[in-house]
Amino acid sequence: MVIIGTGEQGRVVLDILLSNGFKPDGFLNIPPFKKEEICGFPVLGDTSCLCRFKKGIIALGDNLKRKEVFFEATSSGLLLVNAIHSSAVISGLAKLGKGVVISAGAMINTGAEISDNTIINTGAIIEHDCFVSSHSHIGPGACLGGGVFVGECSLIGLSAVVLPDIKIGKGVIVGAGSVVTRNVPDGLTVKGIPAKLYPNKSGFQKLRVG
């Protein structure tokens, strides 16, 4: 099994796996990066080597790049596994897709659904009956109230709050510390308390959170 990605998120995923007593074989680089070792674990090649492995987990903070690698990995026949920190609290009535990363202290409540290739970061709270679409990223300390919908490739920033039953569109950026009180259309940025809408000129731009 390999971790795909050798940056900060790669180290986070490594820590999650180690918290469960599991040691991966190593990492795969994302071209053009060329690292040789991460925290004592070898870098075994790049994504051109995906077909050599049976299982893996994608560790990239950039939503669009993570989506791209997701399709590359699944097309190669790689089985994507979930990385769930031992301190995360997940309801037995929640549903998880494949390739999901859930960091330390995250909480996912009953009826919530977390789709494929999604990151639920440190201490994030996903309340009952939320739906988080594929390739999205819920940042550290963010909180989704009950029944929130988050569209594909969206980013909910650090400590942001989304009130119950709000719909977040595709490719949305919610700024750190914002409070979202109304629905957000596709491809927009919102920030502030209460959050205001701003145009996202690059649309589904590359997104990243620490």
Image (cartoon, rainbow, N blue to C red):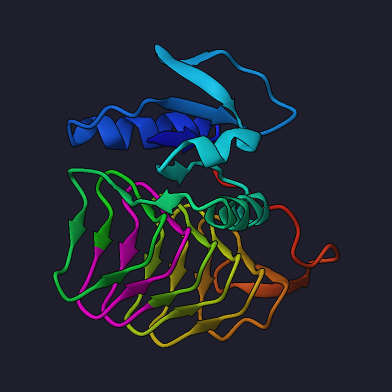
Q: Residue furthest left?
A: 92
Q: How many marks?
A: 0
Between residue 124 and residue 14, name the one nearer to us.
14
Q: Give how far across and how far down residue 97 sits, in percent.
A: 37, 66
Q: Is residue 9 visible?
A: no
- Residue 129 on the magenta span: yes
In the rendered image, the vertical position of residue 1 relative to residue 76, given as above or below: above
Q: Give how far across and how far down residue 54 sits, in percent.
A: 40, 43
Between residue 158 and residue 106, name the one nearer to us.
106
The residue positioned 39% from the left and 56% from the top of the image is 100
Residue 111: image quadrant is bottom left
From the viewer's perspective, tell me whether residue 2 is left or right of residue 61. left
Chain part drawn in magenta: 108-130
Q: Give how far across and how far down residue 182 sits, in percent.
A: 55, 85
Q: Is residue 46 visible?
A: yes
The residue positioned 30% from the left and 83% from the top of the image is 129
Q: Give how far across and how far down residue 50 sits, in percent.
A: 55, 39
